[in-house]
Amino acid sequence: MHYIVIGAGPAGVVAAETLRKNDQHADITIIGAEPEPPYSRMAIPYFLEGKIEQEGSYLRDPSSHFSSLKIDVIQDIVNNVDTAEQLLTLNSGSTLQFDKLLIATGSRPLAPPIPGTDLDIVHSCWTLEDARKIIELAQPGSNVILIGAGFIGCIILESLLKRGINLTIVETGNRMVPRMLNDKAGGLIKSWCIEKGIDVKTSCGVESIIRNTEGLVGVKLSDGSQLAADLVITATGVKPNTEFLENSEIQIDKGLLVNEYMQTSDSNVYAAGDVAQALDFSTGNHEVQAIQTTSTDHGRIAALNMCGKKVQHEGSINMNVLDTVGLISCSFGLWMGVEDGESVEIYNEKDYRYLNLQFDGDILVGASSTGMTQHIGVLRGLIESRLQLGVWKDRLLKDPTLIMEAYMANTQELG
């Protein structure tokens, strides 16, 4: 039996380890497209800041871990998947035969349709190579423009500031992290960043990036202003890596559609992580969730099914926890609410505190908060457990800070 895992991120590594644990004799191969050992993108901010060397981002010790498990790790790019022949064609020209295949190729940053993004000072912040280029250009006193104030952009803010740069954020939405938080919570993050010395421009776009005859770069904005730039970082979303499958018969929608066993439309091919369009716990629909905890869960379940264990994926909760220059925010599940649902919120602009609870009947289905970290674990637990809150639902509508008491009362009743 030969298991091949395409993708050397968290989903792929956890899957390969799970395969080895459950099949001691099979051949297992991980194919990574980057010229790096398997690493975590979530560690890149620490590398940017200088808290760790790039080796600190590695998921496992590359000198011994994979060899001790007899897992082959090769660095190459898969150009084609022939599902009929169960054959992979690699960029190096070689081919590999598989019995079971896991596609965990993740996603890649979307390049915004802006003239000038091909200049050598414009970079995304997605790979270790991107981070090395940013470190080279983000020198103390340099002018850095960050295009996009979504999750990716916000997690690198503090690392950039600690490099002593002058930072301007340009976001087309009317608030920061618009796909994670509502106007009030996103507005608090904007105010917080401004207080920390960051120039934040919302409801504003970048029209072009131009280098003049003297070699200086200007970033022209939709409000008519122009900013000098030594470095431009684009953080405008990501897209699943599925292009190499265009000639295959594997069904692709937003990502690779998978069933409850993480199988694609081909029974010998599975998918996990950012590339997989799998069951969403809250909506019951199949969605792409670019979340590391979801990725590792996908990888483990896919691997168990590849080994014939028949383990069902019950759906992953859409969750984000974000540290923006020391201000912690989170959102879980249907944080934007449901039709005919009820909600309650606390909003303290002065102290940067916000809490929002969303109910469907007497079940908590979504929540978001800013500056109130004590509720994060409980919010997730209540949503995932789908507990019927009974009288506690009305109590929470009067005082949402009683969330811990509501959780304890209902879990004790179940116990």
Image (cartoon, rainbow, N blue to C red):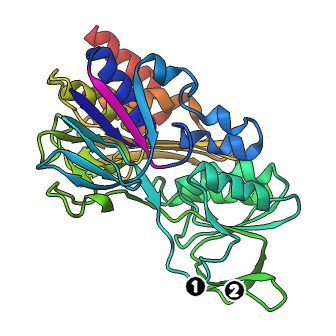
Q: Residue furthest right?
A: 141
Instruction: Give the percent coordinates (x, y) of residue 256.
Output: 24, 52
**Residue 280 seen:** no
Residue topped by disc 1: 115
Figure quadrant of the C terminus: top left
Figure quadrant of the N terminus: top left
Q: Residue at x 21, y 38 (%)?
A: 262
Q: Residues within 10 Å of mark 1 (few under 14, many from 20)?
A: few
Instruction: Give the percent coordinates (x, y) of residue 8.
Output: 44, 39
The three-letter amino acid code for the residue at tag 2 is Ile
Q: Residue at x 55, y 81 (%)?
A: 114
| Relative height, residue 321 to residue 224 (above, below) | above
- Extent of the magenta region: 26-33
State the image quarter where residue 25 is shown.
top left
Q: Which mark is residue 210?
A: 2
Q: Is residue 32 magenta?
A: yes
